[in-house]
Image (cartoon, rainbow, N blue to C red):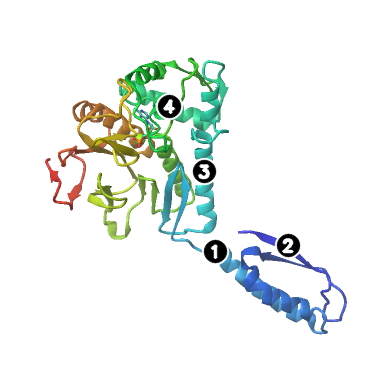
Amino acid sequence: MEVILRNFPNALDSKNKKIKLRILYHRELQLKLSGVSRSINTITNSSSVFLRVLRGFLILNIILFYSCSKTEPSRTETAFGTACTITLYEHGSTGIYNEIFSKIHQIDNLMSINILSSDVSRINNNAGIEPVQVHEETFKVIERAVYYAGLSDGAFDPTVGPLVNLWGIGKGNRNIPSQNEIDKTLTLINWSNIELDPKTNSVFLTQSGMSLDLGAIAKGYAADAAAQIIKEAGIKRALINLGGDVYVLGEKPDKIPWKIGIQHPYEERNVTIGYVQLQKDKALVTSGVYERFFIRNEIRYHHIFNPSNGYPADNNLLSVTIIAQTAMNADALSTAVFVLGYEKGMELIKNIPDAEAMFVFKDRSIRTTSGVNFTLTDNTFTFKN
Ligand code: AMP
Ligand code: MG
């Protein structure tokens, strides 16, 4: 929305004396208002101008008031290379949507590997050269990524950048690398070679050729940041969906649980195999083989890598969904648990309070932890709890 000041130098008062008249008007409404402003310009030359100008001014203010309080039920924009949709079930003004999306874009601009000026690109370009001072939010997310790397014994590793580049999955240059290339690349993947200095918010990758990739955690952080803005605005009910990183804020009217569909791993977007019911203030994030992949000789090569062997993680899993208090935790854990596989993943989840998991296996069976309220709707899958 852009409100601009407009001068009317020929405005006259009721005694035909020139008056200074400046009117605020709304550029988006220029078309609609052109009739009003034209009539203002015309009547400024007539004798009973003051009252008529005043009337025009009042009409203008009513339209302005209406437009400023315009509500939007939902908005979708592209960030993190995916569709991000926010649905505010109350007080969804244009202003609050602008605020939420500018935060989401800010986080993308700081943490994306695909944006040259991002903090993460600057860290990567200085790998083996010098520490790079970053925005406190980037620092916080990297700290958290390192925490999850330790917790998962390196199954989650934010230094997977060189592997992501080597395989080029989702980038067009699809490529099954040679074992030699994979072995060479693996020497660069090691989260313990990230040096963090909290005093200066500086990050240093100790080996040249290393690169950070926050693709498994940054969207979750952005979903939490969006939820924070929404809560601070006093909005009680909202649905945040950043390309599958979902956060449900508040309760639906009459306390009906939220139903979040679980993506069918082999079908198009938005075809689901069932849904999970959530009460309130929960995040649900899925890591799956369907997100970015290519198929060669009937083998699916997807975007979640096992840092211990350099190949897409293969644990007989098609997807892992994590439900947690924050989207950042759910995002990091879904990737970590996908790489760890069912047994080790379950061990990890059991030790994390408030985290629940759902596993979809290649044989089309589904298992969940005890706190997941899942309803299967596709009977080509079997729910084995
Ligand atoms: P997600 O879809 O949240 O599981 O994140 C997958 C993205 O995270 C990939 O596109 C990579 O950019 C990055 N990634 C892949 N494998 C790993 C891993 N083992 N640890 C951390 N990040 C990874
Ligand atoms: Mg993730």
Q: Residue at x 51, y 24 (%)?
A: 124
**Disc on res. 105:** 3
Residue at mark 1 to residue at mark 4: CA–CA distance: 45 Å
Q: CA distance from mark 1 to mark 2?
A: 19 Å
Determine the secondary structure under disc 1. loop
Quadrant of the rendering where the C terminus is positioned:
top left
| Residue type marked 1 | Ser
Amino acid of disc 4: Gly
Residue in the foreground of this view, choosing between 175 and 211? 175
Q: Nearer the viewer, residue 166 or 377?
A: 166
Q: In this orientation, does residue 301 appear? A: yes
**Disc 1 vs disc 4: which is toward the camera?**
4
Q: Could you say which quadrant of the image residue 300 lies in?
A: top left
**Residue reaching furthest to the bottom:** 47
Residue annotated with mark 2? 5
Tell whether circle 4 marks a residue whose Cβ is less than 8 angstroms from ligand 1. Answer: yes
* Residue of label 4: 161
State the SS at label 4: helix
3D distance between C-alphas at marks 1 and 3: 24 Å
Q: Which residue is mark 1?
A: 69
Whether residues under marks 3 and 2 lie with C-beta atoms below 8 angstroms apart, the answer is no
In screen coordinates, is 132 left or right of 268? right
Q: Residues within 10 Å of mark 4 (few under 14, many from 20)?
A: many
Spatial CA distance of label 2 from label 4 is 50 Å
Residue 186, percent across and down?
37, 18
- Where disc 3 sits, the SS reads helix
Circle 2 crowding by C-alpha within 10 Å: few under 14, some 14–19, many from 20: few
Residue type marked 3? His
